[in-house]
Image (cartoon, grey):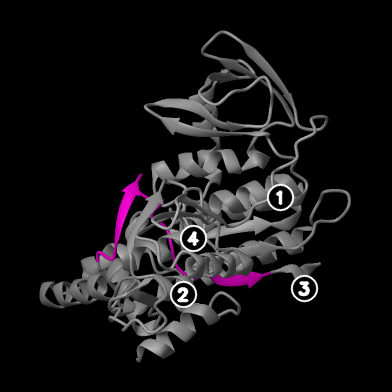
Amino acid sequence: MGANMRRTIRYLNTLVIFGLVGLVHLAAAQPPSDGTLPLEKRLYILSKTYAAIPLYFAHWQGAPEFDLDSLYQEYLKKVIATNDRFQFDLLMLEFVGRLNNGHSWYSDRWLWKAQKPLGFHLTYLDHQWVVTRSLIPQLKPGDLILKIDGQDFESFFQEKKKYINASSERGARTKFPSRTFLFPEEFTLQLASGKEVRINRNTQDIRMPPRKTSGRWIEEGQIAYLKIPGFDNPAFEEKAVELVKKFRNARTLIVDVRGNGGGSTPAKLVSALQDRPYRFWSESTPLTFGLFTAYGSLYRKFGDQLPSDYRTALQMMSEFFNHSQLLWMSIYEPPDSTIFTGKIIILTDRRCASACEDFIVPFKDNKRALIVGERTMGSSGQPYIMDFYDQIS
């Protein structure tokens, strides 16, 4: 498959259901006004999710002990037992979270829309929860949080971790503060200084500053700085390309993507900065032929009853075809829209994820840029999207 065709498929995936790389994103419908969801709709969502995972999930190496059938039966009982929308959402988050994949998740628009901001952000550093940003006067960057409502904050996180989709423990800790629905509407934080801070999300007036791409000269005509907050809005990339043109004669360009959680792969920006052949990720998709599944089923069910030579052959086929994938490697693409040819420094952190990592990979691979900062999140891909809104609203 040619580079241009693969690139086209990559971007179509951000717009339509394609399932190329086998990730699962599930978007639920708005709930009834009384905060409940009928049994048939709950069963429909869970069952469709159960059926989608074998077809579209392609990262089984991260969930080697995942027993889909057993988990489905376990969560089926729990889903039947509650008609509360919030509790159902938590069950679905937990079920999909068992895949241990940062790009496979369940999302309910109502759950996020109803949440008011915390007003601060935390980072887990050196085994401590540290305030790193705050719009609350009583909380300052650098404050250490020990307890929430008298409970050890670390144990609070451990209780909630099962609802966070992540590919690693570090990823779960990084995402935790952004999952505001896991926090009470009112709570008290106890700081290491002994100070207590009362948070009431219903009454505090938190106005988040606007996100925008910005740039400036650090040393006029020599060193330029470019800050890109995300790739979830096309305007962010468009402004970045505009600024690259402005700084095209600089000796050094610093590109700051710290805190950039991704969006759509910024191909135009990558192309504008590359002065040599480059490549993106390799890509894969599940192979779900019935015969492959049958080998495993036969071995598990009848293996002990079969002659040793046949049992050995069946076992080998079962292991070989278990969670099979089609993989095509990335290829180098020649630069065709280069704007900037000077030195590039890219600033990263643990919150750089998804399309932000798509941006970084070509520069790390071909050594076009110096990468400075923390290791990134470690989660990217183009999800298969299943939206339940029209079917059950």
Mark seen at residue 222: none
Q: Tell me residue 298's x, y (percent).
A: 31, 74
Camera-nearest label, 3 or 2: 2
Mark pair 3, 2: CA separation: 32 Å
**Left or right of 69 in this view: 27:** right
Query: What residue is disc 4 on?
Result: 103
Helix, strand or loop at disc 3?
helix
Mark 4 belongs to which amino acid?
His
Mark 1 belongs to which amino acid?
Trp
Q: Tell me residue 266's x, y (percent).
A: 49, 70
Mark pair 3, 4: CA separation: 23 Å
Q: Earlier in the sequence, mark 3 or mark 2?
A: 2
In the image, which residues are magenta?
367-387
Query: What residue is disc 3 on?
Result: 390
Camera-nearest label, 3 or 4: 4
- Number of other residues with Cα within 10 Å of mark 3, as a class: few under 14, some 14 to 19, many 20 or more: few
Query: What residue is disc 1 on?
Result: 112
Helix, strand or loop at disc 2?
helix
Check if residue 369 falls in the magenta segment. Answer: yes
Mark pair 4, 2: CA separation: 20 Å
Q: Earlier in the sequence, mark 4 or mark 1?
A: 4
- Number of other residues with Cα within 10 Å of mark 2, as a class: few under 14, some 14 to 19, many 20 or more: some
Helix, strand or loop at disc 4?
loop
Check if residue 76 falls in the magenta segment. Answer: no
Residue contact at pointers 3 and 1, CB within 8 angstroms = no
Mark pair 4, 1: CA separation: 17 Å
**Left or right of 123 in this view: 198:** right
Residue contact at pointers 3 and 2, CB within 8 angstroms = no
| Residue at 52% from the left image edge and 44% from the top image edge | 175
Query: What residue is disc 2 on?
Result: 267
Tell me: residue 128, above or below residue 336. above
